[in-house]
Image (spheres, rainbow, N blue to C red):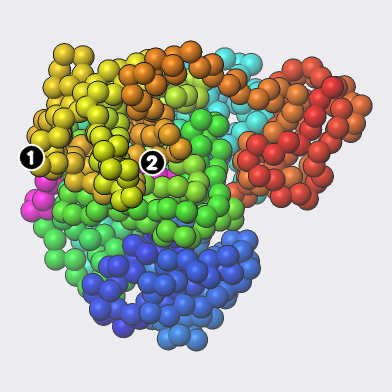
Amino acid sequence: MFKKILIANRGEIACRVIKSAKRMRIRTVAVYSEADRDALHVQMADEAVCIGPPPAAASYLNAARIIEVCGETGAEAVHPGYGFLSENTYFARKLAAAGIAFIGPPPEAISAMGDKLESKRIAARAGVSTIPGHDTIIADAEEAVRVANRIGYPVMLKASAGGGGKGMRVAASDAECRDGFERATNEAKTAFGDNRILIEKFIEEPRHIEMQIIADNFGNTFWLGERECSIQRRHQKVLEESPSPFLDAVTRRRMGEEAVALARAVGYRSAGTVEFVVDRDRNFYFLEMNTRLQVEHPVTEYVTGLDLVELMIRVAANQDLRLVQGEIPMQGWALEARIYAEDPFRKFLPSTGRLIAYRPPAENEHVRVDTGVYEGGEVSIHYDPMIAKLIAHGSTRGEAINRLQEALDAFYIRGVAHNIGFLQALLAHPRFQDGQFTTNFIAAEYPDGFHPADAPRKNPELFVVAAATVHRIYMERAAKLSGQMFGREKRVEKSWVVVMDREHHPVTVSAENHGHGYTVEHAGRSWTVLPDWQLGAPLFRAAVNRVPLCMQVERHGLRYRISHGGCQADVLVLSPRAAELNAHMKEKPPADTSRFLLSPMPGLLLKLPVREGDEVKAGEELAVVEAMKMENSLKAERDAVVARLLANPGDSLAVDQPIIEFG
């Protein structure tokens, strides 16, 4: 076994690998860019070496420098995690030439599976089901139309070297095929430096289901169950689970056997994932093979009890896996939610900055948090905005969903925007609960983006009960203040009015059990509340009618901001007389910002192609803002005249900072 390994990655996956290595008593070396000097993976590793400036191309993608660090530190092997150099054939070969083990598959397997066209040919020869399509590169738009007519619409045009949804277009007609070919070609050239395009039959009502495999150097290859990855936004996975609620035992076994056949056909070893698209009749077709550890690997670890990182390390150290296919356990259900620093209410634009508060839920045998951040740390503009992965396990799918929802309620993040509310809305959606979804689920259910109204409060009375209880506890503390005038001491009243969404909810709150519990009466119902909460703590935990409840509660002036189940409410708790007067108060309308172009995110103003006095038309580009290394084009929503430019190219922008004022 290795004595020291280097992790050629950052963030949560670097921390994840370090945890397994520590359990195996293997020393670890972290590499980091100047932007990651204080990162969590740097703190966790036994040694850490800076490898360059913040841009990934100058640091985490600098293969030569990483290999140098292996020599400097005596690292015998490299785990690449996912992304960056994890599927880089050149890197794997250079490591081998330097006598350093690559904790991953052979370079030949990476190369064979990295090309979508070649991998499809290999899969077909191995007896793996493949999508009907054209097995050579398409020369131009007219050939694309001829091929599409032969296959039959709808068709999928996609980049041969693609991934992550780039260079992909669906066409249902000749006109869409011509346009899709041009756009896919341009995207592929920009993203991958390779403009080759292939065409396949587009599977309607598709599900994205992948099979985890593991293989050693002794001819042993195993499938470890599937992962359902159909909940996607713009081809990026959002929620994953294992097993799939759609597959039956026969289909699962066939899919596993074909995944193993493909792995053997390319001499695969280490962990890998064979991805399939599955139609409504459970016919499945090979999509691609990911020759690395997947982001969503923890759900497989939960249901099998296997540590995939440990198995990868053992394979790289030339150890026998000692597994038996029929004895690999598949127990219970696991789900993973990806928590990102992004704003769902602003079209999921990335959010950067310092994590003023970061308190994940407590981990236990059923809840796991994989993260690479900590309270006080920064979400950098230079890298992927993932904050953490939250994984929950249960004996049934329903139990796993409930545990994931409860854990999300307890996940407290401040300082950056995040997608926890969106995740809660997905988990609570009836179609998700029933397992009736396809890869088009998010696009179909949220065609205009995600809005606060898309996450209605399931139990609004719980917000009322929690607010009344919290306020009662605050009033009890106020009644105990010293120095009060004799005979005029503050009394704790029982009758209050909870004002939420401009609606008045009269309540009575009575102390029970010497102040350790409360009875809240509202709208003819009664709730017994046993709080486990300290004043000022952000998480209000209590047993309400013997059912555990966790809500996030913050005091903002006279109001309480309560979050639960992905919903948020600003609540006032007033005396009956104050509530009567409050009903006559007018709400201040929000400021009119329609005359301004505002930056929707923090970032760098790259381009400002307009001048003062210009007449602009709806849809015309006004500015380009760079954030998370992505260029975001800001366009005019209506015809207007540019009155003033309020920022200049090269400026660092804050959220909602004005860029242009219109006349």
Pick the residue in front: 433 or 37.
37
The answer to whether any part of residue 513 appears in the image is yes
Q: Is residue 476 above or below residue 520?
A: below
Per the rendering, the mark at residue 529 is none
Q: Nearer the viewer, residue 611 or 523?
A: 523
Pick out the residue farthest to the front: 486
Q: Which quarter of the rendering shows the N terminus?
A: bottom left
Q: Estimate the x, y position of residue 192 in percent, counting from the top left.
A: 61, 48
Q: Assess disc 2: are there few (<14), some (14-19) or many (≥20) residues with their C-alpha within 10 Å of its C-alpha.
A: some
Q: What residue would you read off at disc 2? A: 554
Q: What residue is drawn where x is 35% and y is 53%?
A: 359
Q: Amino acid at mark 1?
A: Asn
Q: Indicate the secondary structure of the residue bearing disc 1.
A: loop
Count of numbered tags? 2
Quadrant the C terminus occupies = top right
Left or right: residue 300 versus residue 511 is right
Q: Amino acid at mark 2?
A: Glu
Task: Kindly identify the residue that appears in the image at 38 percent across and 34 percent down.
Answer: 560
Where residue 506 sits: x, y (%)? 27, 18
Q: Residue at x 24, y 53 (%)?
A: 362
Residue interval drawn in magenta: 326-340
Residue at label 1? 513
x and y percentages locating residue 107 in the rendered image: 44, 64
Whether residue 409 is visible here, answered yes or no, is no
Q: Circle 2 sits in a helix, a strand or a loop, which is it? A: strand
Lower position in the chain sequence, tag 2 or tag 1: 1
